[in-house]
C-alpha cells in the first residue's frame, strides 16, 4: 500500500441553531414546513425545496450558506489582518534601514543597502496585492450569498432601506458595490468619466468610507477598507452586521407582503 497522506484539519461547521441564536434571527425560531402548492412541493427559482414562507426560506438558505462557508470566510478575514500587520512591520523595517544607512552615510556605493531596500519594496507590493486579493474574494462570496438571498425574498425594493447603515448606505448595498469594484477594478482604472452603473457603485463605496482614514494604497474596489469598516476589525462584527441587515430585510419584506 502507498503512503497515507496527512489529512487536513477538520473544518468546524457551526450549528444552525447557534447562528440563529447568536444573531437573533427570530423569523427562524418558527417551525418551517415544506411549502406546498396545488398538492406539489413548492420549489425555489433554482430548484431547491422551499421551506416556510418566502422570508423564512430565504433566510434559512442564507444561514445554511453561511454555515458551510464560515470557516473559509473567517480564514480570508483573518489573513487580511495578518497581511496588513506584515505591511506595518515592513514599514518599520524600511524606516530602520533608512536610519541605519543615514548613521553611516558615505558617498561610496552600498550594494547591501540597495538589495535590502528592493527586497522590502517587493514585499510591500506583495502585501498590497495580497490583502486586496483576500478581501476581494471575501466580498465576492458575501455579495453572491446576499444577492441570492435578495432574489429569494424579492427584496430589491428594500435593499437600500434597511440598516445598519454606514454613512447612509446599507450593508447589502455596500457589499454589492465593493464586489462590483473588485470585479471591474481594471475597467474602472481606465475610465475617466464613469457611466451611470459605475458611478452608482463608486458613490456608495466612497460615501460609506467618507470620514475614514485614507489608506497608504487603496485596494481593488476598496474591499479591504470596506471590510475593516463593516467588521470593526473583527470577523464577529462583520457577521453581526450581515445578519442584522439580512434579518431586517426579511422582516420588512414579510411585513409589506402581508
Image (cartoon, helix red, strand yellow):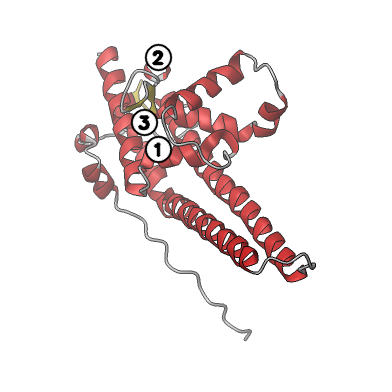
On the image, numbered disc 1 is attached to which residue? 229
Where does the image place residue 30, in percent across and percent down from the top left?
19, 34
Looking at the image, residue 154 sits to the left or right of residue 103; the answer is: left
> Can residue 142 be seen by looking at this rendering?
yes
Mark number displayed over residue 59:
none
Say which residue label 3 marks. Answer: 58
* Label located before the other in sequence (1 or 2): 2
Task: Please tell me in which quadrant of the rendered image residue 250 appears.
Answer: top left
Foreground: disc 3 or disc 2: 2
Disc nearer the start of the sequence (3/1): 3
Query: Helix, strand or loop at disc 2?
Result: helix
Image quarter hosting the N terminus: bottom right
Q: Which residue corresponds to the image point at 65% horizontal and 33% vertical from the top-left? A: 185
| Residue at screen point 38% across, 25% down | 170
Q: Mark 2 and mark 1 in contact (Cβ < 8 Å)?
A: no
Evaluate whether residue 53 shows in this view.
no
Q: Nearer the viewer, residue 232 or 51?
A: 232
Against 189, is 129 above or below? Answer: below
Secondary structure of the residue carrying numbered label 3: helix
Label 1 CA crowd tier, 10 Å (few <14, some 14–19, many 20+): some
Query: Which corner quadrant holds the C terminus?
Result: top left
Pointer 2: what residue? Answer: 157
Mark before the other along the chain sequence, 3 or 2: 3
Image quadrant of residue 163? top left
The secondary structure type at the circle numbered 1 is: helix
Front residue of 48/27: it is 27
Q: CA distance from mark 3 to mark 1?
A: 26 Å
Horizontal side, residue 220 vs residue 39: left or right = right
Amino acid at each position: 500500500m502507498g503512503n497515507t497522506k496527512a489529512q487536513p484539519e477538520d473544518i468546524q461547521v457551526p450549528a444552525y441553531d447557534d447562528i440563529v441564536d447568536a444573531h437573533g434571527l427570530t423569523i427562524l425560531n418558527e417551525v418551517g414546513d415544506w411549502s406546498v402548492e396545488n398538492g406539489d412541493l413548492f420549489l425555489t427559482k433554482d430548484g431547491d425545496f422551499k421551506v416556510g414562507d418566502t422570508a423564512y426560506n430565504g433566510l434559512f438558505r442564507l444561514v445554511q450558506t453561511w454555515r458551510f462557508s464560515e470557516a473559509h470566510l473567517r480564514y480570508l478575514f483573518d489573513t487580511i489582518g495578518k497581511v496588513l500587520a506584515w505591511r506595518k512591520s515592513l514599514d518599520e523595517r524600511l524606516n530602520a534601514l533608512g536610519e541605519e544607512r543615514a548613521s553611516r552615510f558615505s558617498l561610496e556605493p552600498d550594494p547591501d543597502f540597495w538589495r535590502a531596500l528592493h527586497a522590502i519594496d517587493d514585499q510591500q507590493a506583495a502585501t498590497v496585492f495580497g490583502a486586496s486579493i483576500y478581501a476581494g474574494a471575501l466580498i465576492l462570496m458575501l455579495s453572491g450569498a446576499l444577492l441570492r438571498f435578495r432574489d429569494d425574498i424579492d427584496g430589491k425594493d428594500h435593499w437600500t432601506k434597511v440598516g445598519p447603515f454606514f454613512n447612509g448606505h446599507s450593508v447589502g448595498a455596500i457589499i454589492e458595490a465593493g464586489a462590483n469594484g473588485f470585479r471591474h477594478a481594471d475597467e474602472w482604472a481606465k475610465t475617466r468619466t464613469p457611466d451611470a452603473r459605475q458611478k452608482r457603485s463608486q458613490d456608495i463605496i466612497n460615501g460609506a468610507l467618507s470620514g475614514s482614514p485614507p489608506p497608504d494604497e487603496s485596494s481593488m474596489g476598496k474591499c479591504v477598507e470596506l471590510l475593516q469598516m463593516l467588521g470593526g476589525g473583527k470577523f464577529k462584527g462583520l457577521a453581526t452586521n450581515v445578519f442584522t441587515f439580512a434579518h431586517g430585510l426579511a422582516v420588512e419584506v414579510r411585513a409589506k407582503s402581508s
